[in-house]
Image (tube, coloured by chain):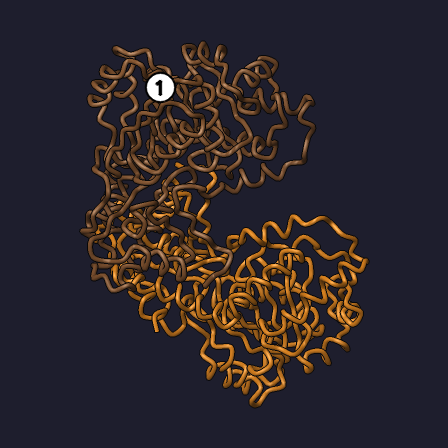
Chain colours: A orange, B brown
Amino acid sequence: MLTDQHLLRIPGPSPIPPSVQQAMNGTMIGHRGKETKELLQRILPRLKPIFGTKQDVIPIAGSGTAGLEMAVTNAAKPGDHVLVIVTGAFGDRFAKICNAYNLHVNRIDVPWGEPIDPSYIESYLQDHPEISVVFATFCETSTGVLNPIQALGKVIHHKSNALLVVDGVSCVAGVETKMDEWGVDILVTGSQKAFMLPAGLMFISASERAWEVIENNPQQRFYLDMRTYKKSLADTSTPFTPALSLLFGLDQVLNLIDQEGLSNVFRRHLLVRDMTREAFKALDIPLLTTDESASPTVTAVQPSDFNSEELRQTLKSHFNLSLAGGQQHLKGKIFRIGHMGYCSPADTLQTISLIEIGLQLIGKNIELGQGTAAAQQIYIQQEVR
Amino acid sequence: MLTDQHLLRIPGPSPIPPSVQQAMNGTMIGHRGKETKELLQRILPRLKPIFGTKQDVIPIAGSGTAGLEMAVTNAAKPGDHVLVIVTGAFGDRFAKICNAYNLHVNRIDVPWGEPIDPSYIESYLQDHPEISVVFATFCETSTGVLNPIQALGKVIHHKSNALLVVDGVSCVAGVETKMDEWGVDILVTGSQKAFMLPAGLMFISASERAWEVIENNPQQRFYLDMRTYKKSLADTSTPFTPALSLLFGLDQVLNLIDQEGLSNVFRRHLLVRDMTREAFKALDIPLLTTDESASPTVTAVQPSDFNSEELRQTLKSHFNLSLAGGQQHLKGKIFRIGHMGYCSPADTLQTISLIEIGLQLIGKNIELGQGTAAAQQIYIQQEVR
């Protein structure tokens, strides 16, 4: 096998574009100097349209989980009753963090692979007026479901005063996001998914309504206190040492997004999702989610007559193609294909054509090229106007 | 379109593996110091099996053409009668260099797309005993023909004393090469093809018989005097400033070749050639060369019912996929696909599946996925044992 080629098609970390890799090699600068201020001045305004907000979007050194914890400790006060909607492994992560802070956790578990039903949440909140924060996941990485955050925002703010806190880790920057319009009060994401960067940065933004809670929240916190960052941001600086090489990379990521156009970035993600899904339909291999709830960034496949793990191992050993397995109770039952960030239609065709070979090699009887042809057809339909 | 993705499938320069790109970023060192000597000590012995020789293989800063000129000025003495076998644009380059040095040039033009016929050369040399050097091209980049150098060496050395000088630019390191066994007297190649490096280095090696000519050759030359390099090599050094970043990269290229195994590198090139050719056969699109003379590093396609340039432009604008056009009188009549160096079966499937879309987009009626399926089938046949 050709060494040094790794086809990374897991739902994060995603591949890094070469110009971003190069940017991250930039000469180190002092984080209290003019260069860093100029870097932040270039970066900060360009994060807002990605979140769909007029509020500041704060980049902070930490993983996505640090971002989720920041959301919990800033939005929820000690003693608060909160609702965590769990549609998979990352909803579960929110619940674990809330439990670690001894909040009163109401938990709604949605079967994995299905999206949140906003009308159920509406009636739940009517029955539980004590709930002050609702935690939800935008793209549930473990299942490939894109939850209806817009509709959820509507029902939550209809009759309740609860804040809506959203984990956008595996989709923001790849999927259209309108934080302000949808009534999302805190939105968190990470750098290693649609942001096309290594892990190590998280991004967080809060609505005016959320800032009121945050400012007066007595919860114990220091590094993850959003107020500290807000103060520094007023001076275009950071309270603690920023992860500068990741910010160098982020600056170039934002250049790439500008060059392609944000709406084209979103359209490309929809395209590669549709190409991927139609390929599996053509091969008669079941998908975990419905078309309506399918995320543009990750697709979960649920085979009925072959072993996911055998396929993954075959693709890894033949092509150094990495796909993800299932998590928790879906382990061994599904496999997941990441198509977020630095992923083109060409990459998607490559992945599909390799999966077809892998299927043959593990003894699943398919017609070679059939999935590829379905994906090619989708490209032609969507891109040629 | 996703910016920052360039699918470079021309017959050189070829893509650079990421670890090689990184290696070339190494801290600069002095070229007269211990580090450079150690670098050369690591590099030089590992070049020999690639050339199939026990002789020294000398890396020199210069393009492939500098290497061809070095071969001419060191092998041919002023007033010599030489034979240049021209099977395409790069045979023609050899003839131009020989003319520039006022040699007596006998030229045999083989129709482009066809290989050298060794028996014809044998009888030609019998009729022209004055010829002291025969110049031939191993892989003719402009047509995708791999000339039968082994058979050519046999007939040349059978009854003549002529030296055989071979341009191996677009195939050495991707195709099995046995310089000593085949009786090649001077072999030249460049860095930007199967060597997986940027252009800027050429490699040259000479047989004992050739060195006798070189040592006593009164031809005027300085930078390209092979004797100067031989003297420095005895001390593991270079007479003039070496292109160090390319040597850093070369060191890593040789690591990658060691990791994959040289015979596996050759096998991979045969595989991607066969995958590419079978795809076009399945699509009923003519190839320029026969299977027997097809190079493992580049494939020329000669469409009968669509416009090559329109296809190339479509693939470039949709996918940033670069294919090469034809050269000289084949301009507009063929297109060429490079599959040398850093090119995997996965890359080949990607290229084919994109070409299928391109064909549809320019109105050529094909069955989508059919070429991909043929290539997939070849992979399965050759790789699963």
Residue at position x 67%, y 34% in the image: B28
Asked if B135 appears above or below B96 in the picture, the reply is above
Q: Nearer the viewer, residue B101 or B382?
A: B101
Left or right for A364, reference A51: left
The foreground one among A368 and B280 is B280
Q: Amino acid at mark 1?
A: His
Q: Which residue is mark 1?
A: B81
Quadrant of image for the C terminus of chain B = top left
Classify the position of the N terminus of chain B by image quarter. Answer: bottom left
Q: Residue at x 80, y 60 (%)?
A: A34
The image quadrant of residue A346 is: bottom left
Depth order, front residue of A342/B176: B176
Question: Could you tell me residue A112's position as x and y percent?
Answer: 42, 66
Image spot of residue A254 (x, y percent): 60, 64
Q: Nearer the viewer, residue B261 or A86?
A: B261
Left or right: B14, with A236 as reference point: left
Furthest residue to the bottom?
A159
User: Residue A311 location, x and y as percent?
Assistant: 34, 47
| Position of residue A144 measured from the top left corner of the image (x, y, whole percent) | 43, 64
Instruction: Using the image, name the chain to which the residue with label 1 belongs.
Output: B
Secondary structure, mark 1, is strand
- Whether residue A101 can be seen here: no
Q: Horizontal placement of A57 versus A326: left or right?
A: right
Please rate how many residues cluster around mark 1, counting C-alpha atoms within 10 Å: few if below 14, some from 14 to 19, many from 20. Answer: many
- The number of numbered badges drawn on the structure is 1
| Above-or-below relation of B284 to B365 | above
Residue A110 in sight in this render: yes
> In screen coordinates, is B69 left or right of A33?
left
User: Residue at horizontal 48%, vertical 66%?
Assistant: A140
Q: Residue at x 61, y 19 (%)?
A: B237
